[in-house]
Amino acid sequence: MAKRATKKLVKKAARVSPPPRKRTPARPAPSRVVRRKPERPASARPRATGSADSIDAKLRSLDKNLLKLLNERTELTTRQLSGRRERQESLFDHSVEQELWQRLDTQNAGPLPSASLHAVFRELITSARSRLKTLRAVYLGPQFSFTHLAAIERFGRTADLIPVNTIASVFEEVNRGHAEYGVVPIENSTDGRIVDTLDMFTRLPLRICGEVQMSIHHNMMSRSPRSEIVEVYSKPQALSQCRDWLARNMPRANLHEVTSTSTAAQLARDKPGAAAIASRQAAVQYDLQIVAERIEDNVHNVTRFAIIGEESTKVTGRDRTALLLQIPHAPGALSDALMAFKKGKINLTWIESFPLRGAEVGYLFFLDFEGHTDESRIKKALAELSRKAVRMEVLGSYPRSEPVE
């Protein structure tokens, strides 16, 4: 009985739970074939826009074209000037440059600033002139003084620029015919007139035939750290134009006046604990570190430099005329004389006075006004002014300039 029951239970269990199936191994997934395009050689690959290689290639091409055009411009300018060779004033006529600057400024869309553009074309013009005649100009030196920078701004680096030690020497060299032009400071927006320059106009028969206005930025430079600077050197005008900054920031430093900012830079180079106040160019020339920049008290500090010579300039429509005037030393004499400018609607831009020399009582007046002596309204005003003057000398008419940074 027991054996039968056992067999029935086994058969029943077999019907409820089927026997396990045999597992077959999983087939691997079919491999996916990726077809790659054949690689092109590196020379055939397109370059990314703006890549270094592409920019270098464009620059080389531009440089080649520019070199050709610059030399062509110089050659044409030389041919243009060669027709004027018999007249020095025509060869060095700067009204031509003024017209060029105006045209370039109108056409220039940047990013090259106008000052840089003028510098490029100035060197082209002066190089062309030097092929015909070497221009010689004297300036109040030494090199890398602000007057030297003004001379470069006006005549370029290819001119024969000669430094002299005094303003009087500049006038004397031009008067003796040793140089065609001279460059001297005449006015500063902070310190006013330059007395030595105005005085020389009363002594020698020279004319003002141009001007350069330069923004004057003073920098303190040294080979010593700022904390170790105990002496500061510069010319009197530079120290004066930075006096507030020096009082606030260098109260313990001893200030020393020297003949020029370049001399100050030499002392700062050679003397430990010394600093100079000078131009950025002087720092480069004398291998000095700028420890404080643009320390002038007046951020709009501008010096006007006069170009002196014997040249007469043409009317440009943006001119200035300089005048020396002596009137009777009597009440109301100056007011009566200046009425000529009011009647002619002439803008008087500058007037300075200084005493007459010797026993004579009275003053000489130095005047600047807008306009050119070849204009009819200026001629009329000067004729009326001369009838009221004891002495009147027109020092020249010349194109006005804008400050150069």
Image: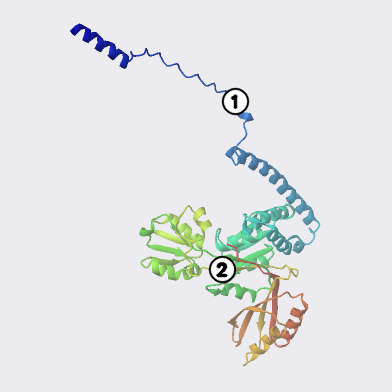
- Residue nearest the observer in this picture, 154 or 22: 22
- In the image, what residue occupies the spot 53% across and 69% down? 301
Q: Which mark is residue 302?
A: 2
Q: Residue at x 44, y 63 (%)?
A: 233
N-terminal of the pair, mark 1 or mark 2, is 1
The amino acid sitting under disc 1 is: Glu
Q: Residue furthest bottom?
A: 331
Residue found at the very far front of the displayed protein: 1
For mark 1, what is the residue? 39
Which of discs 1 and 2 lies nearer the camera? The answer is 1
- Quarter-of-image position of residue 331: bottom right
Question: Within 10 Å of the Cα at label 1, are there few (<14), some (14-19), or many (20+) other Cα atoms?
Answer: few
SS for dot 2: strand
Between residues 389 and 20, which one lies in front from this camera angle?
20
Residue 31 shows in the view = yes
Q: Residues within 10 Å of mark 2 (few under 14, many from 20)?
A: many
The image shows residue 329, relative to residue 92, as above or below, that is below
Based on the displayed image, in which of its 4 quarters is residue 213 positioned? bottom right
| Quarter in which the C terminus is drawn | bottom right
The amino acid type found where label 2 is placed reads Val
Q: CA distance from mark 1 to mark 2?
A: 65 Å
Which x, y percent locates residue 70? 71, 49
Q: Residue at x 64, y 39 (%)?
A: 57
- Where disc 1 sits, the SS reads loop
* In-image side of 383 versus 166 (left or right): right
Image quarter in which the N terminus is found = top left
Horizontal side of 372 relative to 7 (left or right) equals right
In the image, residue 310 lies at what x, y percent?
71, 68
User: Which residue corresponds to the image point at 48% horizontal and 58% vertical from the top-left?
Assistant: 265
Q: Is residue 239 above or below residue 283?
A: below
- Label of residue 297 in the image: none
